[in-house]
Image (spheres, rainbow, N blue to C red):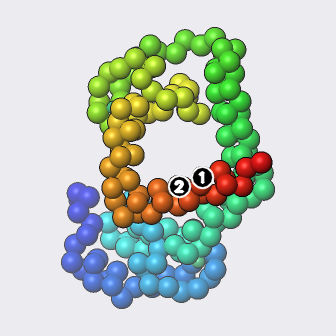
Amino acid sequence: MTKNYHNEAAEEMEMFAEKECNKCELTKPLNKFYKRSPIHPNDYEIYRRPVCKACTRKVNHDYANQPEVVAARKQRLIDMRDELEDYRLGVVVSNLPTHKICRSCEIDQPLTNYALAATADYHRHVCMKCTTAQRNRYHKTPKGIKALARRRARSRQQYEERD
Ligand SMILES: [Zn+2]
Ligand SMILES: [Zn+2]
């Protein structure tokens, strides 16, 4: 038997089938459960995970919001910024590449064509020329026009409020 488990009979069974979630213990239609790879072609139930989509999402969300996970995420960001600061000050002696390919124009360019950023190689993935082009394009869109106006209003306010 091939992997062709999605025969009509199985599909029809899926349409009317329900399944109990191992976590919330509610009985829900099969489409409320994420699929998983087939093990036995005749048993449609095992193509679904034992825990419903809602419970899966909740588990993932709860995990990401655990204090230690949030703290680790924040610390990682601080570490990267610290490293970047070291690099800026010339403290880090690293074997960075001299060139890399821009993710936008796909041209191999010297690292100095990229703005500094908290990334693995301390530079943005997109070259400065492409960044400027992207920004100019964005500032012509309705959303970009509004954002630009907001920023100008803010800096004008700061200018007027200065000592
Ligand atoms: Zn559930
Ligand atoms: Zn580029």
Q: Residue at x 46, y 78 (%)?
A: 32
Q: Position of residue 38 (x, y in %)?
A: 37, 61
The residue where tag 2 is placed is 152
Mark 1, ligand 2, within 8 Å: the answer is no
Q: Position of residue 80 (x, y in %)?
A: 66, 33
- Residue 39 at least partly seen: no
Asked if residue 19 is positioned above or below residue 48 in the image, the reply reads: below
Marks 1 and 2, how far apart in space?
A: 5 Å
Q: Amino acid at mark 2?
A: Arg
- Residue at left offset 71%, top offset 33%: 79
Looking at the image, is 138 positioned above or below residue 82? below
How many callouts does the rendering have? 2
Q: Is residue 107 left or right of residue 99?
A: left
Any atom of ligand 2 within 8 Å of the CB at mark 2?
no
SS of the residue under disc 1: helix
Neighbor class of circle 1 (other Cα within 10 Å; few <14, some 14-19, many 20+) is: few
Residue 117 in the image: state x and y as whole percent: 55, 32
Give the answer, above or below, for where 158 lies relative to 121. Answer: below
Can see residue 18? yes
Q: In which image quadrant can residue 153 be found?
A: bottom right
- Amino acid at dot 1: Ser
Q: Nearer the viewer, residue 11 or 52?
A: 52
Q: Position of residue 111 (x, y in %)?
A: 45, 20
Callout 2: SS: helix
Q: Nearer the viewer, residue 100 or 13?
A: 100
| Quarter in which the N terminus is drawn | bottom left
The residue where tag 1 is placed is 155
Circles 1 and 2: CB distance less than 8 Å?
Answer: yes
The quarter of the rendering in which ligand 2 is drawn is: top left
Q: Which mark is residue 143?
A: none
Q: Quadrant of residue 47?
A: bottom left
